[in-house]
Structure formats: structure tokens, C-alpha cells
Amino acid sequence: MKKLLVSAALLVFAAAMLASCSQRQKWTAEQRKDMREILHSYREMIYVDDLTDTEFTQFANGVVSALEARYPSYQALATMPAVADTVDVAVVAAIVEHLEADARNIRHVYPYNFLVAQGVLPAGLDHDQQRAFYKCLAGKIYNCYTSERAFVDAIMAGTVEPVNMRAMQAACADELFGWTLTEVDLIESLE
């Protein structure tokens, strides 16, 4: 009986130590807030830029949660030599997750208003028509790339051919709305 009580006491002590250690490893609310502030600099990325404020908050919270799960100690993450690269990878992984979850999220890469301004799509499409267009476009894109990750990697590397992408967009516009793109002017910036 004495051995059982000692064993039980040791188990309780070990559990308390584990709980204490895990409590110290968790990020504080302030650290999560700091990381969300860092993620605001990603609002300039085309996918992230098109998110509404609510969508961005959800996106940023997802990235913070993924980073916290991978790096339970905020200090270990913050002091890594390649912390910026690690955050970049987490952001790209979140974008890929969004595209895998719903192919129509391609609308954040090629926003409707941008495509109207470029003459690719007619103005005044309703929500269902836009959804049909993005579903069509996602299908064409994913037929050209081996995965959503390969597509996002190509965007990040700047190897997505604008002419090929415009051809896919025009094909969907024609198939769905009979909208024919007769002249394509590509504008490239040299930033």
C-alpha cells in the first residue's frame, strides 16, 4: 500500500511538472498580437491584399495558430536566424490550404474588379456567375499545375506565364458568358 501511495504521489508530481512546463511554453496573448502585427506586412501580397478585414483576421489567426503549434516557445521562434523565412513559409502554406479548401479562392489571386478593368470579364456579374468563373478558372489552372502548392510556388517565383493565364481566363469567360477577349494588353511593372 505504501508503494502505491508513493507511486501515486510521484505520478501527480510528474503531471504537475509537465503541466507547468507546457504552461511556460504557450504563447502569451501579447506574443500572438505581435505576430499578427508582423503578418500585416503581408497585406501587400496579392492573395492576402484581396481578403476582407474579417477574412484577413481569420487568415492571420490561422497562421499564428500554425506557428504556435510548430514552435511552442515564442522566444525560440523569435530568435531563430531565419524567422522571416519561417513566417513566409507559414503564410504560403496557409494560402495553399485556402486554395485546397475551396478552389474558388483563386478569386483572391485574380480579383473580379481587376479582371473587369483588364477587359477579361464583363462588369455586373452576380455572385453565382463569379463563382462559376472562378471554379472554371481553378479547374484550368489545376490542369496545368501538379498541385495548388505548385501553382502558389509559381506565383511566388514569378514564373506564371501572363499570356497563358490570360488565355485560361478568356476561355472561361467565353465558355460561361460568351465574352470574347479580342485584344490583350499585358502591363508589367519593373519594381
Image (cartoon, rainbow, N blue to C red):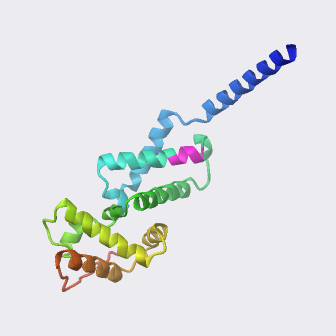
Residue 108 position by quadrant: bottom left
- How many discs appear? 0
Q: Residue at x 48, y 34 (%)?
A: 29
Quarter of the picture containing the C terminus is bottom left
Most distant residue in the bottom direction: 182
Q: Please give the name of the residue rendered at 40% of the width and 53% of the height, measured from the top-left corner.
A: 41
* Residue located farthest toward the left when viewing the structure as drawn: 124
Left or right: 131 as drawn, with respect to 38? left
Above or below 40: residue 170:
below
Nearest the eye: 151 or 33? 151
Residue shown at the point (38%, 46%) measured from the top left: 58
Instruction: State the image coordinates of residue 71 (x, y, percent, origin top left).
Output: 60, 45
Q: Position of residue 23 (x, y in %)?
A: 61, 30
Q: Quadrant of residue 113?
A: bottom left
Left or right relative to 168: residue 143:
right
Q: Is residue 179 left or right of residue 143?
A: left
* Residue nearest the observer in this picture, 89 or 62: 62
- Residue 103: x and y in percent read 37, 64
Image x and y of residue 63, in percent: 47, 49
Q: Is residue 97 at least partly visible in the picture?
A: yes
Q: Is residue 57 above or below residue 13?
A: below
Q: Is residue 133 left or right of residue 179?
A: right
**Quadrant location of the N terminus in the rendered image:** top right
Q: In the image, is residue 168 above or below residue 85? A: below
Magenta segment includes 169: no
Q: Residue furthest front?
A: 1
Asked if the magenta segment contains residue 70, the reply would be yes
Q: Which residues are magenta?
A: 66-71
Q: Nearer the viewer, residue 69 or 9?
A: 9
The answer to whether residue 191 is seen in the rendering is no
What's the magenta bit mostly, secondary-structure-wise?
helix
